[in-house]
Amino acid sequence: QPVLTQSSSASASLGSSVELTCTLSSGHSSYIVAWHQQQPGKAPRYLMIVEGSGNYKKGSGVPDRFSGSTSGADRRLTISNLQLEDEADYYCETWDSNTWVFGGGTKLTIL
Amino acid sequence: QITLKESGPTLVKPTQTLTLTCSFSGFSFSSTRVSVDWIRQPPGKALEWLGLVYWDDDARYSPSLKSRVTITRDTSNNQVVLTMTNMGPLDTGTYFCAHRLDYLITDWGQGTLVTVSS
């Protein structure tokens, strides 16, 4: 069963860029990861998947400011030109053998 | 447009069984690519995957909760039902259902808060 590790918090200034990282456990570095955003008091929202190759595919309506990338076992979510509405919790998700798992989430604060 | 909405009790007593219903629209549960998941979130904590049910009523569960969780589908009423036995205070949280297409959750319900307390 893969384990996903995320930093508990991150912060960045309005209008700047931030990179959030989700690290796959040993033996699972090729896995696809999905990213979800959860704004305060709301349900999560699907953002994108990021493949081991670095390719990413966004969900419907996700702004161009959001992009994904890969470095080894790390699956990254980059948000450019940060807006106030980007202040949220961000969760990564993956699966193996018909079971799914979420990372612990990163709380992004906009300064 | 896909919509999902959770319903059920907001308060359950310790040791009781929780039953929640996910009512959905906008997709067909007859597709082999479709499943409906249940995910929960304790207050202030991370998301936890509970399990899912496929179009053919086959279900998969989190290994840590497998003995307590059952997920079934009612295609005639466009509903999916979560049953969780022996509820305790640590089961307090918001319970979400979600639409999964192939391997990806693409749509979430709004969630329903369940409190376990005597």
Image: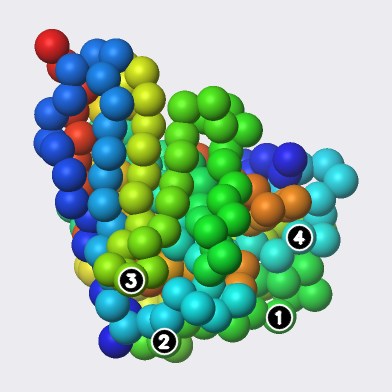
Precedes in sequence: disc 1 or disc 4: 4
Q: Which residue is mark 4?
A: A31
- Mark seen at residue B76: 3
Q: Secondary structure at mark 3?
A: helix
How much space separates mark 1 and mark 3, taking CA atoms? 39 Å
Q: Pointer 1: residues within 10 angstroms few (<14), some, or many (20+)?
A: few
Can residue B21 be seen from the camera position used here? yes
**Three-letter amino acid code at disc 3?**
Ser
Camera-nearest residue between A111 and A88: A88
Dot 2 surroundings within 10 Å: few (below 14), some, or many (20 or more)?
few
Kindly identify which numbered label has been placed on residue A60: 2
Q: Is residue B49 left or right of residue A61?
A: right
Q: Position of residue B26 (x, y in %)?
A: 32, 83
User: In the rendered image of this protein, does residue B15 appear above or below residue B12?
Assistant: above
Are marks 3 and 4 in one subunit? no
Badge 2 element = loop
Residue in the foreground of this view, choosing between A67 and B34? B34
